Image: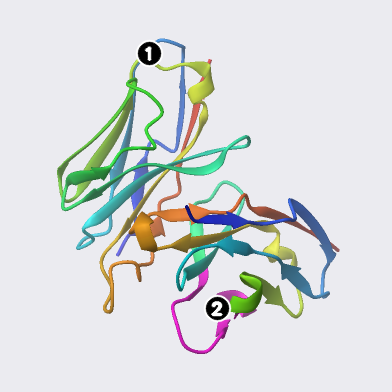
Amino acid sequence: DAGVIQSPRHEVTEMGQEVTLRCKPISGHDYLFWYRQTMMRGLELLIYFNNNVPIDDSGMPEDRFSAKMPNASFSTLKIQPSEPRDSAVYFCASTTIAGGGSAKTIQYFGAGTRLSVL
Amino acid sequence: AQSVTQPDIHITVSEGASLELRCNYSYGATPYLFWYVQSPGQGLQLLLKYFSGDTLVQGIKGFEAEFKRSQSSFNLRKPSVHWSDAAEYFCAVVGGAAGNKLTFGGGTRVLVKP
């Protein structure tokens, strides 16, 4: 399997522009997670989906952020309008339920998208 | 709420020397624990995990970790470090009220001296 695929790897944009980050999870995985990594706050979970349905979006910083999962093989994280403080590395991860309990899961991460908002 | 603390932000170690990275967690039940490694410009790769059973778990790249319930710790070790081990290491916990949400520690950046 190719693993979790994120695009683009790097994105440079100007403040106020719309930014769309993309993620293709591992085939067969039914959970998808979006994380943000910054020096100040470390790794933060933004939102996660189960079977394409958003389960917990409590980590989404504000209304400028939105995420969708139109099908099992694709998800987007959109920032509109973008601000310089949104500059970070955004990771997507996917997993599926292992035997013995829902928490015994290993999340597989993509390589991330490094976003710079000028 | 569960939390993970990695007390050491940076560690410098000589190549060939041993390495130990500390991880302490706060969790109300039996935790499911993970160590991930992030090489520069890369995503996170799972090194090892602890779900239950033997408290000493072996992982990839020669790493091992020991779960100590009495100390709420899950420290990562490697007997002899290679230059390629220079990276950032994250301890994480999942489960309980948080369901499938991973809670990460702040990370420890490891620098390997020749």
Q: Quadrant of residue B7?
A: bottom right
- What amino acid is labelled 1 in the image? Gln
Please provide the residue range marked out in magenta. B47-67
The chain containing the residue under callout 1 comes to: A
Q: Which residue is mark 1?
A: A17
Q: Position of residue A70 (x, y in %)?
A: 14, 40
Q: Residue at x 56, y 85 (%)?
A: B55
Q: Residue at x 39, y 37 (%)?
A: A59
Give the residue furthest to the bottom: B54
Can residue B65 be seen here? The reply is: no
Q: Residue at x 56, y 83 (%)?
A: B58
The number of numbered badges drawn on the structure is: 2
Tell which of A20 and A62 is nearer to you: A62
Give the residue furthest to the left: A71
The chain containing the residue under callout 2 comes to: B
Q: Position of residue B47 (x, y in %)?
A: 54, 70
Tell which of B85 and A57 is nearer to you: A57
- What amino acid is labelled 2 in the image? Gly
Give the class, few, some or many, for how many residues have Cα within 10 Å of label 2's Cα (few <14, many ≥20).
some
- Asked if residue B12 lies in the magenta stretch, the reply is no
Q: Horizontal placement of A1 versus B7: left or right? A: left
* Labels 2 & 1 near each other (Cβ < 8 A): no
Q: Which residue is mark 2?
A: B59
Q: Quadrant of residue B77?
A: bottom right
Separation (CA) of disc 2 from disc 1: 43 Å
Q: Quadrant of residue B102?
A: bottom left
Can residue A30 be seen here? The reply is: yes
Q: Position of residue A29 (x, y in %)?
A: 23, 61
Q: Secondary structure under badge 2?
A: loop
